[in-house]
Amino acid sequence: MIHLGLSWSLIFSLTAMKVASGNSETISVTNGEKEGTWGERETCPSKQKALGFEQKVEESESTFDGTAVNGIKLICGTPGQTGSYTEITSQTGKFGDWKGRKMCKEGGVLQSFWLRVDPPHDYEDDEAVTNIKFVCSTGEILEGEGEHGGEYGDKSPMCLNGIIGLKTLVQPHKGFFGDDTSLNDVIFYCSP
Ligand SMILES: [Ca+2]
Ligand SMILES: [Ca+2]
Ligand SMILES: [Ca+2]
């Protein structure tokens, strides 16, 4: 009887884990950097999901202290309906420019992502997050117009029902003599 009880509780906990990983509340990657403060959680209006995104990027060629990605904006809307969008951002750094929307094919929503990250160097310029790419539920991969420092890490878990919000870790401006990196990491929130 003891063995039976143990195996039932094991099966129950495995099932619970499977449900949790398929429909987690947030998704993140393991290769983000650590500096800065987390911005506010921002979410799409009720019933809307992230159909695309836009990045604020400082071009590395334009400066000796590059920061690459400074902000991420989600383009929220109703899947399958075009024309009416809501833009949301969390904390955003002061450098760079918004580079234009990247949208899933009609009916698609953002589900998972990779971060390209330039890790800290002792003597060279650091930039932390240099680019991002997402997978849409319609199958295509959308890559931002970011920079080329560092490498992409492992893909995040998937929001089965789509991404609906975000929170970003951004390093405050360190001034002329400090090596700025601006955006260091991001967490996305999943639709229930
Ligand atoms: Ca820098
Ligand atoms: Ca950055
Ligand atoms: Ca600086």
Image (cartoon, rainbow, N blue to C red):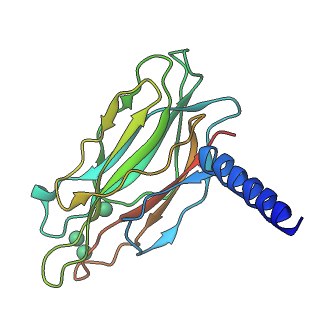
2 displayed left or right of 109: right
Q: Quadrant of the N terminus?
A: bottom right
Q: Residue at x 41, y 20 (%)?
A: 105
Q: Quadrant of residue 190?
A: top right
Q: Say which residue appears at 24% left-offset and 48% top-offset.
A: 146
> Where in the image, quadrant-wise, is ligand 1 located?
bottom left
Q: Nearer the viewer, residue 150 or 159?
A: 159
Quadrant of the image containing the C terminus: top right
The location of residue 71, given as percent across then percent down, is: 39, 53
Residue in the image at 13% along x and 63% along y: 63
Quarter of the rendering containing residue 55: top left
Nearer the observer, 150 or 23: 23
Horizontal side, residue 20 vs residue 123: left or right: right
- Measuring from the top left, give residue 93's x and y in whole percent: 39, 60
Q: Position of residue 90 (x, y in %)?
A: 52, 54
In screen coordinates, is 170 left or right of 61?
Answer: right
- Horizontal arrangement in the rendering, residue 162 relative to residue 102 (left or right): right
